[in-house]
Amino acid sequence: MTALVVYESMFGNTHTVAERIARGLGGATLVAVAEATAEAIAAADLVVVGGPTHVHGMVSDRTREGARQQAAEPGSGLTLDPDAEGPTLRDWFDGLALPAECRAAAFDTRVHGPAPLTGRASRGIAKRLERHGATLVAPPESFFVERDNHLSEGEADRAEAWGASLARSPATA
Ligand SMILES: Cc1cc2nc3c(=O)[nH]c(=O)nc-3n(C[C@H](O)[C@H](O)[C@H](O)COP(=O)(O)O)c2cc1C
């Protein structure tokens, strides 16, 4: 199986989660949105896409500005991911062409709490993947950060285990 993990990240947590999912998949190719070219996608038979939850959904240019402001606050302890300036997943989906019979999965990072209260970006990501003709191999998954925007304990390990479960998953969720 050739798997591609595509991530968007502002503070680096989704980047870390994506790295561990790729490892769990047995060494999938890991790319930021800007590097997820048509060629990279065409070479993959499983595409796993994830991003942070912002204002109950996927990141937008406006919420990115909010994230930059949070990182700039004195004592925030936050640094911007090197890929925080590239295209958003929303932009990427606008120009996306997935190969026929593409298998896919969606994930996000978000704060702890029931999804109806926090929102979850993975829902929008999964919807867009399906709209582009992909078959989801697993329900959308969330990985949690603390209120200070740092990854909760055990979540990186859980991400790796989720990646491994995707590698074993049948064709449909
Ligand atoms: C502008 C902004 C809005 C946010 N809105 C939400 C939200 O509605 N629900 C939620 O669970 N987390 C929210 N968060 C927390 C993010 O989900 C968290 O920062 C993100 O998962 C960290 O991922 P990253 O390090 O890859 O950017 C928000 C964060 C920012 C900066």
Image (cartoon, grey):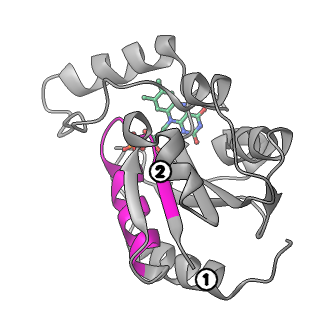
In the rendered image, residue 146 lying in the magenta stretch gets the answer no
User: Crowding at label 2, few (<14), some or many (≥20) Cα neighbours within 10 Å?
Assistant: some
Residue 151, percent from left and from top: 37, 58
Task: Name the residue rendered at 20%, 33% in the picture.
Answer: 76
Task: Name the residue rendered at 47%, 70% in the picture.
Answer: 21
In the rendered image, residue 19 lying in the magenta stretch gets the answer yes
- Residue 57 visible at all: yes
Task: Name the residue rendered at 66%, 32% in the picture.
Answer: 57
Above or below, 114 against 38 in this view is: below
Q: Residue furthest bottom?
A: 168
Position of 103 with respect to 42 (left or right) is right
Above or below, 140 against 138 in this view is: above
Q: Are marks 2 and 1 in contact (CB under 8 Å)?
A: no
Position of 99 with respect to 66 (left or right) is right
Residue 18, percent from left and from top: 43, 60
Position of 9 with respect to 113 (left or right) is left
Q: Distance from label 2 to label 1 (Cα)?
A: 19 Å
**The one of 55 and 166 positioned closer to us in this rendering:** 166
Magenta span of residues: 4-23
Q: Give the tally of numbered discs.
A: 2
In the rendered view of the protein, which quadrant contains the C terminus? bottom right
Q: Quadrant of residue 68?
A: top left
Q: Residue furthest left?
A: 74
Secondary structure under the numbered disc 1 in the rendered image: helix
Q: Which mark is residue 40?
A: 2
Q: Which mark is residue 12?
A: none
Q: Which mark is residue 167?
A: 1
Q: Quadrant of residue 125?
A: top right
Report the mark closest to the observer, 2 or 1: 2
Some atom of ligand 1 lies within 8 Å of the CB belonging to the residue at label 1: no
